[in-house]
Amino acid sequence: MRKNGKLANVYLAAVFIILYAPIFYLMYYSFNSGGTMHDFKGFTWEWYKEVFHDTRLFIIVLNTLIIALLSAAISTILGVIGAIAIANVKKNQTKNTLLSFNNVLIVSPDVIIGASFLILFTMIGLKLGFMSVLLSHIAFSVPIVVIMVLPKLQEMSSSLIDAAKDLGASRWDVLSKVILPYITPGIFAGFFMALTYSLDDFAVTFFVTGNGFSTLSVEIYSMARQGISLTINALSTLIFLFTMILVVGYYFINQRNMKAGRMGVRK
């Protein structure tokens, strides 16, 4: 058993090294005064200063954050409504069908999704830009929220709802005071997952973005095509750190909710 445990730890460590080594390599050379991805000549903040002094890049970062926050918020609302609707379906066949439709955007290749949205927006005459990117991000984020929220709804005992109704609670009271508080961890998980997916998405955004509007993923791709620049390293490092802050923030929020739930059970 101990040998198996040690082998598992070694395997896990090797996986993390393979995954994170390229990221740390990129971060390391973001401080290289030599301006190349080899032969580290000295420490400098020059590339980070270029990032912060680039007004166009600041606008793109702002666009990315607005898109991510708006799409995450709207998709969380729609996803919670969808998850509750699916959970309340009586027939298993109908429920499985709805879940299958929900999972289509998750399992479909991003290139196909992006091309489909591009054709749709072209057909209806929607100008490519902020609105097209926002609608696309909402569309592929809603199924993610549904998947995160639905297990919490299935985990919840129906006796809680029956007890609330017996005590005279209205439908709104049941929803706002029983169901939503119980599935709050799933809602937060769905929101942060949608936010992360929106920040990281490139393929779909590349298809539906238009002239005069861009997001960080598309901008980094454009910068990389022009040649090696350590400004890309600095920008990528900042994005990675921001994502880590989101993950850590979600972890602490989740831990606090779990502690609050345990305290409630004890009372």
Image (cartoon, grey):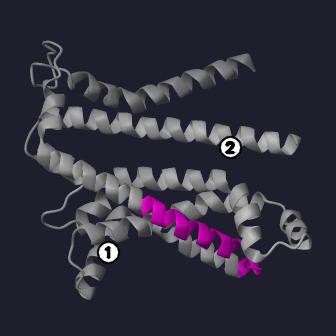
Q: Residue at x 24, y 81 (%)?
A: 126
Q: Position of residue 192 (x, y in %)?
A: 50, 50
Question: Which one is in front, 46 or 55?
Answer: 55
- Magenta stretch, main secondary structure, is helix
What is the x, y in percent for residue 181? 70, 56
Name the residue: 52% across, 63% down: 76
Q: Is residue 78 magenta?
A: yes
Mark in front: 2 vs 1: 2
> Which residue sits at x=75%, y=21%?
1
The magenta stretch is: 71-93
Q: Quadrant of residue 261?
A: top right
**Vertical comparison of 75 with 42: above or below:** below
According to the image, label 2 marks what residue? Answer: 257
User: In the drawing, does residue 79 fall left or right of residue 244?
Assistant: right
Is residue 144 found left or right of 164 in the rendered image? left
The residue sitting at the bottom extreme is: 124
- Quote the CA–CA distance across marks 2 and 1: 37 Å
Residue 160 screen position, x and y as percent: 85, 63
State whether residue 216 appears in this view. Answer: no
Q: Which labelled disc corresponds to residue 117? A: 1
